[in-house]
Amino acid sequence: MRAISQDTFGGPEVLHLIETDRPTPLPTEVLVRVHAAGVNPVDAKTRAGQGVAGLLGDPPFILGWDVSGVVEEIGHGVHTLAVGDEVYGMPWFPRAASAYAEYVTAPSRHFARKPANLSHTDAAAVPLAGLTAYQILTALAGVEKGQRVLIHAAAGGVGHLAVQFAKELGAYVVGTASAGKHEWLRGLGADEVIDYHSADVAEATGDIDVAVDLVGSETTLAQSVAVTRPGGLVVAVPSGTSPELLARAAETGVRVKSYLVEPDGHALAEIAALIECGAVRAEVEEVFPLADAAAAHRRLEDGRTRGKLVLAVR
């Protein structure tokens, strides 16, 4: 099968196309013929030796976690899926899933049937970003109707889905994004959008119940703590927080938690239902052929992506 591998840590240029053996599913696993694979910031960080590189070990390895495709083979003990099912998922994260490839194997319960109204290309944009947003807002934060939710980097892959999930939960949604993306975010349900280039977030809003910081800088985390009410929650997604910031949050009664997404086929089924009924949609800004994975990473790292980037495998 074809796959994208790397022999060393580095920039996008280290990614190259290889031929390798097709994996074989073990008991409780499925073999999925990949039609499309999502590209995420953690992919680029891991490629460079950061992200979850410490868990994958030294190269060579195959990046990627987001997949959409068709079940081609099932292992003994699989009862939730059948050969021919169209599925999507985020298998194995943060361990290697090797999704930049024509086939992947993983436990069947790491997948769910893909939304019927999405192509494989669009479905591949959802799992990692969708699960991150959904798990934070439901399982971690328990967002309720009428609460005020702040989402930093609201136009990104996780952010634009978080806006929609928060709105579906009945929250008043405040997002940060560059000015050119404000109208689009309002169309997704954002009640307020703040231009982080020209406005001080700490002055532009307040009385926040849940702040989801998808930037993870000391500046945005400090802003999040400053605008969150006592008893409220700040979720730091890409990185941890400094002891000084944690101490400042504790003084004001604000809780700060970090978060790492985990595979969850049940949640993916719930997300698929929201997509199928039209409550949530995923934005794919650009699609690249599998062989052009390096170009997709360069595009991702320019920092101006709206929604998601996807690799077309089939």
Image: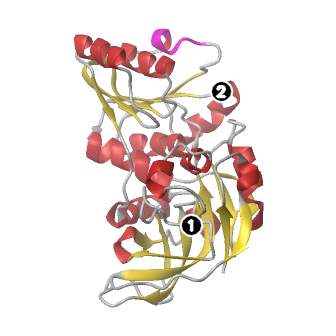
Q: Residues within 10 Å of mark 1 (few under 14, many from 20)?
A: many
Q: Which mark is residue 99?
A: 1
Q: Residue at x 49, y 74 (%)?
A: 87
SS assignment for the magenta stretch, majority: helix
**Magenta span contains residue 201:** yes
Return the residue at label 2.
178
Q: Secondary structure at mark 2?
A: loop
Q: Decide which of 279, 298 is in the foreground and name it.
A: 298
Q: Secondary structure at mark 1?
A: loop
**Magenta span contains residue 238:** no
Q: Residues within 10 Å of mark 2 (few under 14, many from 20)?
A: some
Hey, what amino acid is under mark 1?
A: Ala
Residue 283, position as x, y percentages in the image:
62, 51
Q: Is residue 88 left or right of residue 230?
A: right
Splitting the image into 4 quarters, where does residue 181 fall? top right
Residue 100, position as x, y percentages in the image:
62, 66
Instruction: Work out whether mark 2 precedes mark 1 in sequence or the reverse, and give the earlier one.
Output: 1
Q: Magenta residues?
A: 199-203
Distance from Cα at disc 2 to Cα at disc 1: 31 Å
